[in-house]
């Protein structure tokens, strides 16, 4: 008579085991990211052009309202559309990542309840999809710079560093919201409000230089202020006055958001299969 036994597949207990599992399941990460990219543009008439059309429409609105009517000042010698796009692209990367990753666990509930794999793969793959959108949208910025014959300086070499900071911020927020959304479904209604409100309080349609000096540091509590200012400095060049105290504050908050989101997600993911 053969002995009876149960086979239990569960995550490793230590953080080292968890990172090894992430590496072992790297092919699943790439598969899910590629699947989400295909699904996003499946059965669409225009396809990937939506990644250019959406920021273009926002650019037109901001140019008319803030550039022509309100006549907000422009940073450096850059045309107003270039200044707006330099901020709009990282903001859309953050907002799209937050929106997509917050619902990612719910949309993959069947996988979570049936098989073990590091759940971090799911919101992280959603951020990668938003990164692809960003790279496609970046062609719009290149086209606008060519139209205005604007040539960036050596500061453009630092752009990957600020892009990495934007991804860390987006993933940190996505980890928080995806984990909270599993337990409290009300968060799916809160996310659109956060995205819409954040667009108005972030220096997208205007320069953060319009904020009075005595409020600049307080304004930098918004972590996206440092990210957006960094993008503008990298793209627009030395004509932008970089507010370093505010950037370091935003940098610290971005890292705190990421690390706290990662810790909270790790504590919560063992209960995902039961709650979801």
Image (spheres, rainbow, N blue to C red):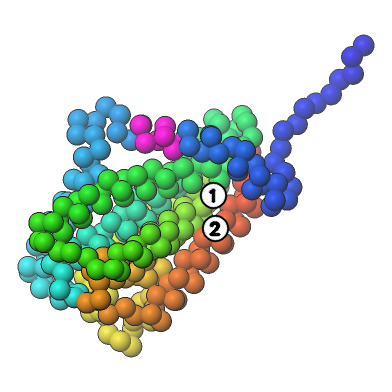
| Magenta-highlighted residues | 32-38
Q: Is residue 216 magenta?
A: no
Do we see residue 256 in this rendering? yes
Residue visible at 22% across and 41% down?
Answer: 50
Q: Are marks 2 and 1 in contact (CB under 8 Å)?
A: yes
In this view, 138 is above or below 80: above
Q: Residue furthest left?
A: 68
Estimate the x, y position of residue 91 in percent, counting from the top left: 32, 59
Q: Residue furthest right?
A: 1
- What whole-number distance in Å separates the C-alpha atoms at marks 2 and 1? 9 Å
The image quarter containing residue 199 is bottom left
Most extreme residue toward the top, as rendered? 1
Give the residue at mark 1. Answer: 179
Nearest to the eye among marks 2 and 1: give it: 2
**On the rendered structure, is 142 left or right of 67?**
right
Q: Position of residue 62 (x, y in %)?
A: 15, 61
SS at circle 1: helix
Magenta part, dominant SS: helix
Label 2: element kind: helix
List x then y, in percent, for residue 175.
Answer: 51, 52
Residue 197, percent across and down? 31, 62
Q: In this rendering, is residue 45 above or below 208?
A: above
Instruction: Tell me which residue sits at (30%, 69%) in the image.
Output: 155
- Residues 159 and 108: in front is 159
- Quarter holding the N terminus is top right
* Residue at the limit of the structure toward the front, as seen here: 154
Disc with the residue nearer the chain's start (2 vs 1): 1
Indicate whether residue 37 is drawn in magenta: yes
Locate residue 82: give its quadrant: bottom left
The residue indicated by pointer 2 is 261
Q: Is residue 185 visible?
A: no
């Amino acid at each position: 008579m053969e002995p009876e036994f149960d086979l239990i597949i569960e995550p490793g207990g230590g953080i080292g085991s968890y990172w090894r599992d992430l590496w072992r399941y790297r092919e699943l990460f790439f598969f899910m990211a590629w699947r989400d990219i295909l699904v996003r543009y499946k059965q669409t008439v225009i396809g990937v052009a939506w990644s250019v059309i959406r920021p273009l429409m926002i650019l037109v609105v901001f140019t008319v309202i803030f550039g022509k009517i309100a006549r907000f000042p422009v940073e450096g010698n850059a045309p107003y559309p270039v200044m707006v796009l330099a901020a709009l692209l990282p903001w859309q990367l953050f907002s799209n990542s937050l929106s997509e990753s917050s619902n990612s666990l719910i949309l993959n509930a069947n996988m979570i309840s049936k098989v073990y794999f590091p759940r971090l793969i799911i919101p992280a793959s959603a951020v990668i999809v938003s990164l692809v959108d960003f790279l496609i949208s970046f062609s719009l910025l290149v086209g606008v710079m060519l139209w205005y014959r604007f040539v960036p300086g050596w500061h453009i070499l630092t752009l990957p560093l600020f892009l990495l900071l934007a991804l860390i911020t987006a993933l940190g927020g996505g980890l928080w919201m995806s984990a909270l959304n599993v337990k409290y479904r009300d968060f799916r209604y809160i996310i659109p409000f956060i995205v819409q409100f954040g667009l108005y309080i972030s220096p997208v349609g205007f320069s953060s230089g319009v904020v009075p000096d005595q409020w600049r540091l307080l304004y930098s509590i918004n972590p996206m202020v440092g990210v957006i200012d960094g993008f503008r400095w990298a793209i627009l060049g030395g004509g932008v006055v970089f507010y370093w105290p505010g950037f370091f504050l935003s940098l610290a908050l971005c890292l705190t958001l990421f690390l706290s989101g990662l810790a909270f997600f790790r504590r919560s993911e063992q209960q995902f299969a039961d709650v979801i």
